């Protein structure tokens, strides 16, 4: 008997996880850890900065939703 379960949550708690991963990303990005793998495949460093900004925007949205 095969069973599957899917669980979806709409919660502002995800912001804590995003903050944790953003902190780890920032630490590695400052040291340029593993960056050569991505730039060697054609990515630009600016794409990482833009992605960081996008994640910070999402965190801000979750924070404002939590504050309401």
Image (cartoon, rainbow, N blue to C red):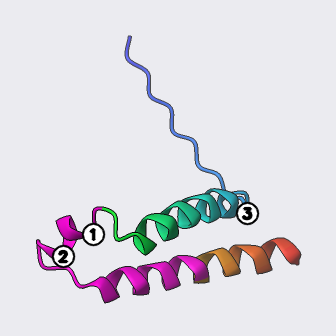
| Residue situated in front as seen by the camera: 66 or 23 | 23
Q: Quadrant of the N terminus?
A: top left
Decide: few, some or many residues near mark 3? Use Cα within 10 Å; few <14, some 14-19, many ≥20: some
Q: Dot 1 lies on which element? A: helix
Up-down: is 51 above or below 28?
below
Question: What residue is drawn where x is 55% and y is 67%?
Answer: 22
Magenta highlight on residue 36: yes
Image coords of residue 9 (percent x, y): 65, 52
Question: Which of the numbered marks, if any, corresponds to residue 67?
Answer: none
Residue occupying the far top of the picture: 1
| Residue situated in front as seen by the camera: 52 or 58 | 52
Nearer to us: label 3 or label 1: 1
Residue receiving disc 1: 35
Judge from the rendering whether residue 10 lies leftward or rightward of residue 31; answer left or right.
Answer: right
Question: What residue is drawn where x is 44% and y is 74%?
Answer: 30
Image coords of residue 43 (percent x, y): 20, 79
Image coords of residue 24 (percent x, y): 52, 60
Q: Dot 2 lies on which element? A: helix
Residue receiving disc 3: 12
Q: Dot 3 lies on which element? A: loop
Question: Quarter of the image holding residue 15?
Answer: bottom right
Up-down: is 38 above or below 7?
below
Magenta highlight on residue 54: yes
The answer for how far apart the CA atoms under marks 3 and 1 are is 31 Å
Image coords of residue 44 (percent x, y): 23, 85
Decide: few, some or many residues near mark 2? Use Cα within 10 Å; few <14, some 14-19, many ≥20: few
What type of secondary structure mainly makes up the magenta span? helix
The answer for how far apart the CA atoms under marks 3 and 2 are is 33 Å
Residue receiving disc 2: 39
């Amino acid at each position: 008997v095969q069973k599957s379960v899917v669980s979806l949550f709409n919660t502002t708690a995800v912001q804590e996880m995003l903050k944790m991963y953003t902190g780890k990303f920032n630490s590695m990005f400052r040291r340029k850890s593993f960056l050569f793998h991505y730039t060697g495949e054609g990515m630009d460093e600016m794409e990482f900065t833009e992605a960081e900004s996008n994640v910070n925007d999402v965190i801000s949205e979750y924070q404002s939703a939590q504050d309401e």
